[in-house]
Amino acid sequence: MFDEDSKQPVKWQKSEAYDRIVNYCSYQERSLKDIRSKLISHGIYHNELEDLINQLVEENIVNELRYASSFVRSKFKYNHWGKNKILGELRFEQIPNSTILKAMEEIDEKEYLLMTKTLIKKKAKSIQKSSPSPVIIRKKIFSFLVQKGFSYDDINLAFEGIGKL
């Protein structure tokens, strides 16, 4: 896929671009931003680019709601990201807000609270060895969870459900 001499992506012909981009989309959900970038990097521009994207959308090969829902499920379940971080990443991918809101419904509130509590307990266990002060432990846990994309309200709610560490 790269030109051996210049290490640049090989320019695709218009006739082969559709098959290649369908293959690119076949093994993982892609956002329109990903597809646009891929096509541009292989020399597909302007009308050809938009025509290909429209065709992919019409044939349901690319579906932003499906992409966003898959993204939300995987980042929540496997990466243990909070809603704020997921929301930010989907906005970075230029997913429309209405689509993001529908996709965020994939997160069950009870599961979300349970995961927040689990992360608090896990982090507390690892911190307690180095920091005996409950105030420092709580501060470090807050910092960790905010970095993972959890809101202060969600963290406080989880702490209330746990009680004393």
Image (cartoon, helix red, strand yellow):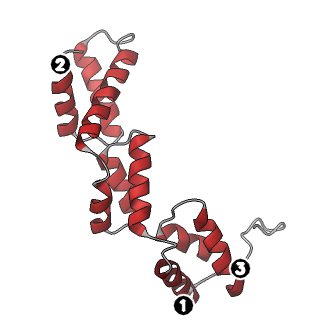
Pointer 3 local density, CA inside 10 Å: few below 14, some 14–19, many at least 20 = some
Numbered circle sitting on residue 12? 3
Q: Position of residue 52 (x, y in %)?
A: 56, 83
| Residue 49 seen anywhere in this rendered image of the structure | yes
Mark 3 vs mark 2: give the one in front.
2
Q: In which quarter of the image is residue 120?
A: top left
Q: Quick one: SS at disc 3?
A: loop
* Mark 1 Cα shell of 10 Å, populated few (<14), some (14-19), many (≥20): few
- Mark number for residue 2? none
Q: Residue at x 51, y 64 (%)?
A: 30
Q: Which residue is drawn at 20% across and 26% down?
A: 159
Mark 1 or mark 3: whose residue is earlier in sequence: 3
Q: Do the residues labelled 3 and 2 touch (CB within 8 Å)?
A: no
Q: Which amino acid does label 3 sit on?
A: Trp
Q: In this orientation, which residue lies closer to the viewer: 12 or 107?
A: 107
Number of numbered markers? 3
User: Real-space Cα distance between discs 1 and 2?
Assistant: 59 Å
Q: As shown in the figure, which amino acid type bears the numbered disc 1?
A: Asn
Quick one: quadrant of the C terminus?
A: top left
Residue indicated by mark 2: 163
Amino acid type shown at disc 2: Gly
Give SS at disc 1: helix
Give me the C-alpha separation between circle 1 and circle 3: 15 Å
* Of marks 1 and 2, the one in the foreground: 2
Q: What element carries label 2?
A: loop
Q: Is residue 42 visible in the rendered structure shown here?
A: no
Residue on which the image places disc 1 = 47
Q: Give the quarter of the image for residue 3.
A: bottom right
